[in-house]
Amino acid sequence: MRVASRAEGRVEASAAPATHRTQAVLGWVLGLGAAALALAAPHIFTGIAARHLLVLIAINIVLVASLDLLIGGAGLLSLGHAAFMGIGAYASALVVKSGQPFPVGLLAAVLAAALAGLIIGLPALRLKGHYFSVVTFIVGIIVTILMTNMVDLTRGPMGLTGIPFVKLEVFGLEHTFKTIVFKVGYYYFVLAFAALVLLLRWRVGRSRFGRALTAIKGDENLAESVGIATYRVKVTAFAVAAAVAGVAGSLYAHYAAFISPDSFTFVHSFDLFVMNLLGGAGTVLGPIVGPVFLTALTAGLKGLSPALAQVMHGVVLIVVIVVLPTGIAGGLKRLVAALEDRRR
């Protein structure tokens, strides 16, 4: 009996690394496939509307990857993430409209959103669970109201118009992304940001800071008892996530050349939340899968009825919670593990 138990233990021990290897190989294959498809996408989908959708998907990937640092990383359910995108968008637009170059506007977006994240996170992260989520929801609404009422600065519900396109100078050569018609160049520009943010999210997840976030997500009291400064880690993560959302806001503002408070409401925050859960919170491919699927679905449904699009988001959320609690990427991971078990 002991010999049999030892043999079974050895089989299980050897099977676990094999499963991990299979999952790792599958992850690399899917990742490389996604990268190849992303690079080829504007040459496959050549219509202006399709390329516009590709730009929005890339911007949403930046947003969802930053939100995943909170939800997937630390288990912090933030329901006001679009507010930081809006702060970054207005900061960048106003700075560049004043005559400053785009890099200065981008820096202003990062600093403004990070500062807002710090100001909001310091008191909000004293709360836990649903209380924190409710506060972020309320703050998101307050930020939208402020954007609407600060007419002298934001032009209120009329929106900010005439936002300059991104103009870059490299090695003495100047290029302006005129995104109204020519979208391919700007798509690759935003895609580079998306790739960088995804890489940073992956690296953070495997860093000491990422392990601290995982410990907080598992059991915050236990994490605190072993010496992790949980409050400081959460505030840092919240400020970083806000800063990255500010980057997405800047990219969006100089793409659309027009922004208004309606672009950064709770509806958008809810969309980002659903994208994160749909793709798979805390997974490598989740911040890609969720935005691709839901952005495309939303665009298709809005052509029929905007109200139908919002209803469908609710339906998708229910389906994910019931059928795919770990999202599409998490579901694939579980499927691979199940197939490995059956093969053995």
Image: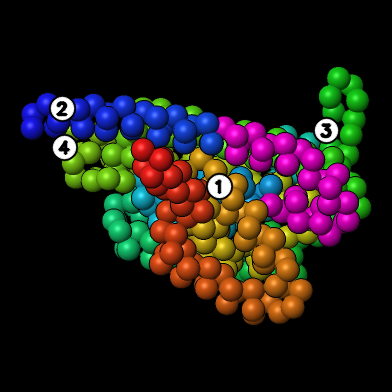
- Residue type at numbered disc 2: Arg
SS for callout 4: helix
Which residue does the numbered mark 4 point to in the structure image?
225
Amino acid on which disc 1 is placed? Pro
Q: Identify the mark at residue 211; answer none if there is no mark.
A: none
Give the number of the disc on residue 6. 2
Q: CA distance from mark 1 to mark 4?
A: 32 Å
Please tell me how crowded label 4 is: few (under 14), some (14-19), or many (20+) other residues with Cα within 10 Å. few
Q: Position of residue 171 (x, y in %)?
A: 86, 19
Q: Do residues under tags 2 and 3 come within 8 Å of each other at their CB atoms? A: no
Q: Is residue 294 visible?
A: yes
> Cβ–Cβ below 8 Å for labels 3 and 4?
no
Give the mark nearest the N terminus, 2 or 4: 2
What is the distance, in whole Å, between disc 2 and disc 4 at their CAs? 36 Å
Question: Left of 145 or right of it: where is 17?
Answer: left
Mark in front: 1 vs 4: 1
Q: Are marks 1 and 3 in contact (CB under 8 Å)?
A: no
Give the overall secondary structure of the magenta segment. helix
Give the image location of residue 41, x and y in percent. 78, 45
| Classed neighbour count for the residue bearing mark 2: other residues with Cα under 10 Å, few (<14), some (14–19), many (≥20) | few
- The residue that label 1 is drawn on is 287
Q: Earlier in the sequence, mark 1 or mark 2?
A: 2
Q: Nearer the viewer, residue 172 or 63?
A: 63
**Labels 2, 4: front one:** 2
- Provide the residue designation for mark 3: 168
Q: Residue furthest top?
A: 171
Q: Give the residue at x 60% y 39%.
A: 30
